[in-house]
């Protein structure tokens, strides 16, 4: 496959690579993760100044007119350092919903603040009972006296602890699992009746459980058409899968390279571990899984840019492969490092935990295999 980045994209790639190398050694990541708000505000401001937060938005909205390929370039490099800044929550999820369904007034009030890094945004889509089904929405929004009133609970909402505004997916019509009748609402994080239970995740990030009790939202904060929000939600989820897959590819590259380097240094029976043929085969398998994921990531991303509707099957295939291969590469990296592989002092275990979480986000490998075979 011939996948050539433009000169601008190569410059961005090199810029992000330098940023990760200079700022994201393991000890600094652990330090940032352990302190509030769970990421570096200084780094977030630097990302805004460098223009990374505006790449995915249209020029008329103040962005640089980029697409999913630009996001791939960023996220692959972020994956090599396990970057903590909430790019996925703000730009891919929250920003993705606003740019697709927001009114002109909403875009004007939200997108410039996202691009300059002054506004924190996220998307609350998942619910306890929904597993991985985007259309399984029990949170209800009813119209009352000119407003919408939201009631329900949302699970595993990324970056909600820091978010100024939260896009809530709620049901305005139909049964709990209908694709029709889903609407998206922009809600202030400090609204009366909105409560957050914040917690750290196993991969060093932050998430929240959100309760909505008679939260009032004005009609101006409806994103897209009432009852027609599923199409926006599906498109945002696909973009998130591509972004997470790019991050996973970056993480897998670090894992297999670290493993090769370690086996060349570690000696057993007066020979480096890399001399043993059975371990050579294991590392070749790790490399092949990584390369397959990277190739399918490029294909799925380009297909999505050209025709999002026709790319759906490839997106399912990609998420399945990323889940399966990520766990395979992670497990082998940990095993070939021996007991050191699970220690907090070695970065291999941190990358493996992130790959396990990526597998569970927006549907795991088995879920997407079922979706792939059904299309």
Image (cartoon, rainbow, N blue to C red):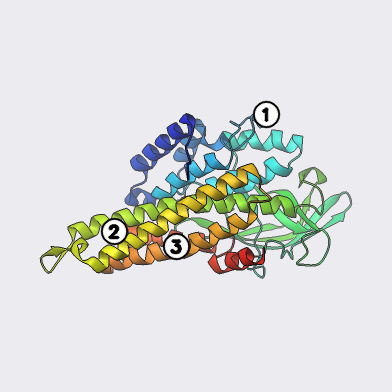
Q: Which residue is mark 3?
A: 325
Q: Residue furthest front?
A: 1
Please tell me whether mark 1 or mark 3 is closer to you in this view: 3
Q: Please, is residue 204 above or below residue 219 in the view?
A: below
Identity of the residue drawn at 47% across and 65% down = 324
Q: Which residue is mark 2?
A: 259
Callout 1: SS: helix
Q: Which comes before the other along the chain, label 3 or label 2?
A: 2
Q: Which comes before the other along the chain, label 2 or label 1?
A: 1
Identity of the residue drawn at 63% across and 68% down = 131
Residue 36 left/right relative to 213 = left
Identity of the residue drawn at 47% across and 51% down = 295
Identity of the residue drawn at 37% across and 46% down = 24
Residue 60 badge: 1
Residue 268 left/right relative to 107 = left
**Where on the picture, by quarter, is residue 292?**
bottom left
Q: Please, is residue 236 above or below residue 127 in the view?
A: above
Query: Do the numbered discs 1 and 3 sit on residues whose CB atoms are within 8 Å?
Result: no
- Give the x, y percent position of residue 169: 71, 56
Callout 2: SS: helix
Q: CA distance from mark 2 to mark 1?
A: 46 Å
Residue 117 at least partly seen: no
Residue 245 badge: none
User: Quadrant where the C terminus lies?
Assistant: bottom right
Q: How crowded is the residue under tag 3: few (<14 C-alpha within 10 Å), some, or many (20+)? A: many
- Give the x, y percent position of residue 191: 70, 51
Q: Which comes before the other along the chain, label 1 or label 3?
A: 1
């Amino acid at each position: 496959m011939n996948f050539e980045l433009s000169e601008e994209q190569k410059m961005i790639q090199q810029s992000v690579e330098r940023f990760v190398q200079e700022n994201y050694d393991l000890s600094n990541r652990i330090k940032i993760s352990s302190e509030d708000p769970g990421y570096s505000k200084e780094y977030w401001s630097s990302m805004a100044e460098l223009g990374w937060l505006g790449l995915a938005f249209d020029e008329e909205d103040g962005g640089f007119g980029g697409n999913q390929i630009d996001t791939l370039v960023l996220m692959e490099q972020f994956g090599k350092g396990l970057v903590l800044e909430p790019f996925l929550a703000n730009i891919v999820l929250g920003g993705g919903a606003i740019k697709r369904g927001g009114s002109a007034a909403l875009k004007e009030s939200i997108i410039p603040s996202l691009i300059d890094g002054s506004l924190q945004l996220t998307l609350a889509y998942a619910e306890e009972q929904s597993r991985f089904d985007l259309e399984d929405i029990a949170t209800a929004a009813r119209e009352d006296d000119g407003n919408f009133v939201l009631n329900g609970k949302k699970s595993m909402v990324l970056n909600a602890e820091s978010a100024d505004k939260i896009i809530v997916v709620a049901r305005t019509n139909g049964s709990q699992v209908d694709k029709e009748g889903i609407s998206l609402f922009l809600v202030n994080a400090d609204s009366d009746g909105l409560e957050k239970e914040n917690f750290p995740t196993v991969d060093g990030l932050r998430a929240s459980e959100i309760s909505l009790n008679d939260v009032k939202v004005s009609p101006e904060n409806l994103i897209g058409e009432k009852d027609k929000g599923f199409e926006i939600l599906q498109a945002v989820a696909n973009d998130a899968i591509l972004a997470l897959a790019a991050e996973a590819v970056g993480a897998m590259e670090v894992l297999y390279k670290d493993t090769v380097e370690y086996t060349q240094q570690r000696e057993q029976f007066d020979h480096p571990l890399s001399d043993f043929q059975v371990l050579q085969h294991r590392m070749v398998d790790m490399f092949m899984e990584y390369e397959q994921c990277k190739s399918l990531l490029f294909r799925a991303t380009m297909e999505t840019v050209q025709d999002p509707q026709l790319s759906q099957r490839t997106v399912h295939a990609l998420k399945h492969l990323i889940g399966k291969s990520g766990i395979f590469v992670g497990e082998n990296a940990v095993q070939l490092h021996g007991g050191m592989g699970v220690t907090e002092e070695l970065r291999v275990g941190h990358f493996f935990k992130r790959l396990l979480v990526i597998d569970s986000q927006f549907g795991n490998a088995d879920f997407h295999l079922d979706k792939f075979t059904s299309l």
